[in-house]
Amino acid sequence: MRMIGRTELPLKSRQLARGGQSTILKEDYRLSELESSMANSVARDSVSAVRRAHAKAPVHVRLFGDRIFNAVTFILAIFILALLFGLAIALIVSSFPAIRAFGLHFFVSSTWDPVADQYGALPFIYGTFVSSFLALLIAVPLSLGVALCLSEMAPDWLGHRLGFLVDLLAAIPSVVYGLWAVFVMGPWIRDYLEPPLQHWFGFLPFFQGPKVSVGMLSAGVVLAIMIIPYISSVCTDVFRVVPHTQREAALALGATQWEMVKTAVIPYGMTGVIGAIILGLGRALGETIAVAMVIGNSAEISASLFKPAATLASVIANEFAEATSDMYVAALIELGLVLLILGIALNVVARALVLGVQQRRYHEVGK
């Protein structure tokens, strides 16, 4: 009996010790909860005090910063519009002698004779449109291929590095492109590209005439190389923001990678693709130095891509320093006005195309 009593006594003491420890832990937990609730209440009181102090401030004091911000942004927006209108008015005033002398006949006449003071912009408008269209015809498929490769095919570590190298092409000055086109690309096109084109497609008027290193074809190719970085960079960013759920849904339905790109990626980013193409077209329309160095600068309209031609920007750059009469200067400034009108019309058409694609997408989603 004595042995049993001795063993029960330590057991009871240990049980009492354990109960005391659990009680202490519970008290500590309650104290921590109390401290956290007090801290939260203090934080809420401080936030509410700040809100009450802000609410007590006069209304005109709180709205003063908003009024300054609105006024500054409004002034900046008006300044951009005033700059555009001021540029247009300056061009109109400076070219008014040519506008008064030739009228609308200036846009349809192909005569450019500084000696007789007879001027017409049709050859340069034609050269601008043809060279830009040829550049888009070459650059758009290549840019889309580069964008799809960087965003869909290549791994991330390689895609970003290649994208950086493609973007570097946009940093090369135009005169460097022009020199390279004069000494390298132009002779290569004359010796290796124009002969097979004339041999296989010589029955078409586009590939007839003498083979020279300067002409419409050389200008179109160098323009295509110059606008590829702009179109590919924008298209790459557009394709990368396409939700992954679009791709996963197409692949889950059994589509191949090409079918996934065709059905899920390109339609979703079509608005951005159109914007990128219009951006490249605007860059091609306004390019000056590189085109002036390789296009040949001939005020003639010819269907052949091998023959020299001229654009609005190239004739202004080449002849403005040599203009001797007031009418000559006014005619060149009117060419600049025509180029400005083309740029504005291009932006309007681009906005209409983007809105049309967006509305078509909304109608398809609604159905």
Image (spheres, rainbow, N blue to C red):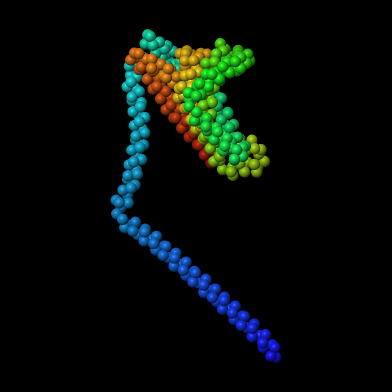
Q: Is residue 19 above or below residue 348?
A: below
Could you tell me residue 256's position as x and y percent? Answer: 66, 38
Front-most of residues 271 and 113: 113
Front-most of residues 281 and 264: 281
Specify the quadrant that holds the N terminus.
Answer: bottom right
Specify the quadrant that holds the C terminus.
Answer: top right
Is 30 on the left-hand or right-hand side of 60?
Answer: right
The residue that appears at 54% across and 35% down in the rendered structure is: 164
**Quarter occupied by residue 339:** top left
The residue that appears at 46% across and 32% down in the rendered structure is: 351
Q: Is residue 85 above or below residue 71?
A: above
Image label count? 0
**Quarter occupied by residue 4:** bottom right
Q: Is residue 221 above or below residue 262?
A: above
Could you tell me residue 115's position as x and y percent? Answer: 38, 9
The residue that appears at 33% across and 16% down in the rendered structure is: 97
Q: Is residue 197 visible?
A: no
Front-most of residues 31 and 202: 31
Front-most of residues 186 and 334: 186
Is 350 on the left-hand or right-hand side of 86?
Answer: right
